[in-house]
Image (cartoon, grey):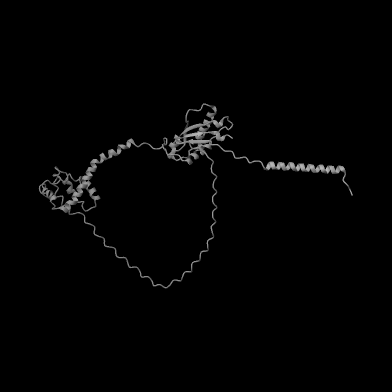
Amino acid sequence: MYEPSRDDSRLNRWAGISAGLHALVLGIGALFVLARPIPEPEEQGIAVELVSPGPPLLAQADVPAPIPAPPTPQAEPRPPTPEPPAPEPPRNTPPEPPPPPPPPPPAPSPSPAPPSPTPPTPSPPAPPPAPTPEPTPAPRQTQQTPPPPTPQPPQQQAAAPPRPTPPLPLPPPPVPPPPEPSEQAGTGQTPPVQRPQERSNSVLNTLERLRTTQQQDRAPTARPNPSGSPQQGGGSPTGTAALTQGEIRGLAEQISECWNVDRGMLGLDQIVVELRVQLDSQGVVRNVVPSGALPSDPRARSVYESARRALMSPQCNPLRVPPSKYGTVMASIFRFNPRGLVR
């Protein structure tokens, strides 16, 4: 039987000690690695603030994570629709009676005879000379013909009678008889004939008044036209509605996308720049001015120029604000503080 020598036993002992030390070192290293503390997330500062006429409000905040849409429920299978029953065979029904014949069309009503009997009325042309006191009697004779037609034709005929007025003075002899019936016209002996004449006379009077006042009526309508009304559109808006917290936050996020600052600048976290904007009617920034004096420090001047370029950048215009609040935006102060960009 082989017996290990003294050297072999010593070598085996040192090998066991070495293996134990290695195992101990590995165990201690594993404990340090596993027990390493997790670093806490760093807080990010606010880069842009919008100071409204009221108390200052923060203009930027972390965007909430979008809420996942709920899963759409699967449509349940619909039960099979029952087949409609087979239609029953038609039964023998008695034939329907034929509709009664339409009634014969009514006979055309005879057209009203033209006012032929009215021509003899010109016998009393005496009223034309009588109008010396009042011009009304002349239209009475000329409008005895229009009573049958509609009110519109009388107006057209009433306008035409003044043309035949010159031949009326030809028969002067019958002047004495007509004045008596004209004076008795108001007694009521001939009311059915005089009622349409009075209506026609009123129409003539209104037409004459319209003709005489036509030029006067046109003059006032033409006077205001040259002056015109003030032109609308353009100019600066005047809305003064207050901005909501969501609108202020949206403006800050919109402008922050176009703002770039040199992060390696010394003392960047201590620089604050305040500006005002001027908008047009479309909400586009047309001019940017400092809220106070123009900064003289080169670092502050650099931040001011970068903020001004961000406000006037086409990528950030027009501002996402309702037109009724453009005035509030122009009265507010945009405060740029790059401390949120320093890490």
Q: Which residue shows up at 28% across the image and 38% down it?
A: 220
**Residue 269: where, in percent of width, then height?**
55, 32
Q: Quadrant of residue 25?
A: top right
Q: Is residue 153 left or right of residue 232?
A: left
Q: Which residue shows up at 24% across the image and 41% down it?
A: 213
Q: Nearer the viewer, residue 329 or 99?
A: 329
Count the labels in the image. Answer: 0
Q: Nearer the viewer, residue 160 or 257?
A: 257
Q: Which residue shows up at 82% across the image and 43% down it?
A: 13
**Residue 62: where, in percent of width, then height?**
54, 41
Q: Is residue 67 left or right of residue 153?
A: right
**Residue 121: where, in percent of width, then height?**
15, 51
Which part of the image, by quadrant, shows the C terminus?
top right
**Residue 283: where, in percent of width, then height?**
46, 38
Residue 160 in sight from this viewpoint? no
Q: Which residue shows up at 22% across the image and 43% down it?
A: 209
- Up/down of 66 relative to 301, above or below: below
Q: Nearer the viewer, residue 310 or 160?
A: 310
Residue 335 in sight from this viewpoint? yes
Of all residues, the one furthest to the right in this rendering is 1
Q: Is residue 279 left or right of residue 111?
A: right
Q: Is residue 298 left or right of residue 193?
A: right
Q: Nearer the viewer, residue 226 or 11?
A: 11
Q: Quadrant of residue 338?
A: top right
Of all residues, the one furthest to the top in this rendering is 296
